[in-house]
């Protein structure tokens, strides 16, 4: 068997990233869910979903897969326990007798012969990843067949789960101390239901030697019904977003005109006191990197330069437009300002990429505009997000709003950038800031920069982990070692915390 063997697991084929890219089936196999195995599976799921622009399913899929893996490992421990203790698992009385003390013996007693001997035994768990017929499949397999009473109980719970309206109802009805696939399985299925996935997305089967549970996801969410809803709701909303104000567009033209002089640009900005004040505040804020405090527009133009002023004009115009039409989502803007600041610093890691710092700033600032629009289209989503966040593993607030409308917030942000006629590089950086693997070569530096800045912010929000960051991005910035990554992140945080946070 051709595979990589390391630390109690192996992957086949060894290059799983290539397998994902080419659409080839692959699997990871192990006996225990050790921390390094858990981290690797999380990374694989992230990359697998990233390939198909389905990252908004990430936390749901990770939570479900982890639950299924734990159930598979528990089933293997149960078989080993029955063998060691001499109980017949296929005999009803023997099964009852064995189950009386199974959980206490195996899970409440750290030193027991079952957990000690599972490694090296014949029992394994395999997680298989595949794509067939426009669907993605994640199948958790353990190499012992589930017995009929267990299978019947699980099938009953599958049917029951789609009738529950909340977790309290499930808890009162299903809590079962004798079996492993109890409340956890119900939570798994309710996650599927609340994610808008049909009952058929979860299936269980067995052969003489194997038990398989498969999670099925559509690789393309744009069904005719979904596309119709996107067309009617999203595109109409985008068309109603105001254009960037005329005076800002005119000043940007001045900035791009080689014949313009600094005093002409300063004068044009100063004619709009609100715009002038916004630019000064933004240039002095934590969201923008400058060498010193700026007090006047003349100083701003002189210190920041025409390119920087052009960047701040766009930023100011976007903020003005978005906040005039939509509710001011403080948390989203706070993250956006921080991401923009981080992007400017990251762009200067390599001398060759310093020239993209202003573009990176803008792309990072605009990256979450799609979230604001999504939340504004359906304000009831906020309460739904709070409800579903009670499920274990559910910390990603993007999940509900994106599944409900069938479009990722980054894709929506890209459409908004096109509405504002922003250039292709800026639009692509916004649209692909969660998908660095899709970066066109000329935009690689820019998209990698925004992606990394976003990862740092999401780590601070407890929504991301070093283990799932794109390997190519880490290599690009020479941050492959966790210690180097953390040290650089700490420098960014220190720099940001030392800035003036005043932003209107």
Image: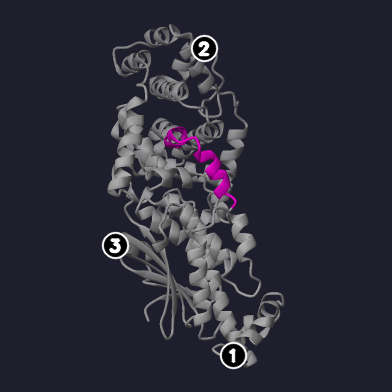
Residue bounds of the magenta highlight: 370-390
Please give left or right for residue 327 compared with residue 253 in the image: right
Residue 12 percent location from the top left of the image: 38, 73
Res 308 → quadrant: top left
Q: Where is residue 145 in the image (x, y as percent from the top left)?
A: 47, 82
Sequence order check, earlier mark of 1 and 2: 1
Residue on which disc 3 sits: 22
Residue found at x 37% / y 8%:
264
Residue 296, numbered circle: 2
Q: Which of marks 3 and 2 is nearer the N terminus?
A: 3
Q: What is the magenta segment's predominant secondary structure?
A: helix
User: Residue 345, percent across and down?
Assistant: 49, 36
Q: Identify the residue at image location x=56%, y=34%.
A: 331
Q: As rendered, which of 297 and 328 lies closer to the eye?
A: 328
Q: What element carries label 3?
A: helix
User: Dot 1 corresponds to which residue?
Assistant: 83
């Amino acid at each position: 068997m051709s595979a990589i063997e390391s630390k109690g697991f192996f992957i086949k084929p060894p290059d799983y990233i290539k397998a994902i890219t080419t659409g080839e089936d692959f699997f990871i196999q192990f006996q225990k869910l050790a921390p390094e195995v858990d981290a690797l599976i999380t990374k694989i799921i992230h990359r697998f979903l990233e390939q198909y622009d389905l990252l908004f399913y990430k936390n749901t899929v990770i939570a479900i897969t982890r639950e299924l893996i734990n159930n598979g490992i528990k089933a293997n421990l149960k078989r080993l326990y029955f063998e060691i203790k001499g109980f017949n698992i296929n005999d009803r009385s023997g099964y009852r007798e064995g189950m009386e003390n199974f959980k206490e013996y195996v899970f409440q007693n750290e030193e027991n012969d079952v957990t000690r001997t599972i490694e090296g035994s014949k029992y394994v768990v395999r997680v298989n990843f595949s794509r067939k017929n426009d669907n993605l499949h994640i199948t958790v397999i353990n190499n012992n067949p589930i017995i009929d009473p267990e299978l019947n109980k699980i099938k009953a719970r599958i049917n029951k789960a789609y009738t529950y309206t909340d977790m309290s109802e499930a808890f009162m009805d299903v809590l079962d101390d004798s079996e492993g696939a109890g409340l956890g399985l119900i939570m798994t299925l309710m996650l599927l239901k609340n994610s808008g996935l049909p009952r058929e997305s979860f299936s269980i089967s067995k052969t003489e030697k194997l038990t398989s549970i498969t999670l099925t996801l559509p690789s393309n969410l744009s069904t005719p019904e979904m596309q119709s809803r996107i067309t009617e709701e999203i595109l109409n909303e985008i068309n109603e977003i105001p254009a960037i104000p005329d005076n800002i567009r005119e000043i940007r033209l001045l900035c791009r005109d080689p014949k313009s002089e600094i005093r002409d640009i300063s004068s044009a900005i100063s004619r709009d006191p609100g715009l002038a004040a916004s630019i000064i505040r933004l240039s002095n804020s934590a969201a923008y990197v400058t060498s010193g405090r700026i007090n006047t527009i003349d100083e701003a133009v002189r210190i920041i330069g025409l390119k920087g002023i052009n960047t701040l004009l766009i930023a100011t115009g976007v903020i003005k437009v978005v906040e005039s039409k939509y509710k001011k989502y403080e948390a989203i803007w706070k993250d956006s300002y921080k991401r923009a600041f981080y992007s400017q610093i990251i762009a200067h890691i390599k001398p060759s990429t310093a020239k993209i710092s202003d573009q990176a700033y803008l792309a990072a600032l605009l990256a979450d505009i799609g979230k604001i629009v999504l939340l504004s289209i359906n304000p009831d989503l906020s309460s739904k997000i709070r409800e579903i966040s009670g499920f274990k593993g559910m910390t990603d607030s993007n999940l509900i709003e994106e599944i409900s409308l069938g479009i990722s917030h980054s894709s929506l942000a890209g459409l908004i950038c096109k509405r504002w006629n922003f250039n292709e590089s800026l639009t692509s950086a916004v649209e692909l800031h969660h998908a660095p693997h899709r970066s066109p070569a000329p935009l690689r530096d820019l998209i990698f920069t925004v992606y990394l800045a976003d990862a740092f912010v999401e780590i601070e929000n407890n929504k991301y982990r070093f283990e799932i960051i794109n390997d190519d991005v880490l290599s690009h910035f020479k941050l492959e070692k966790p210690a180097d990554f953390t040290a650089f992140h700490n420098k960014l945080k220190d720099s940001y915390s030392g800035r003036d946070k005043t932003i209107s």
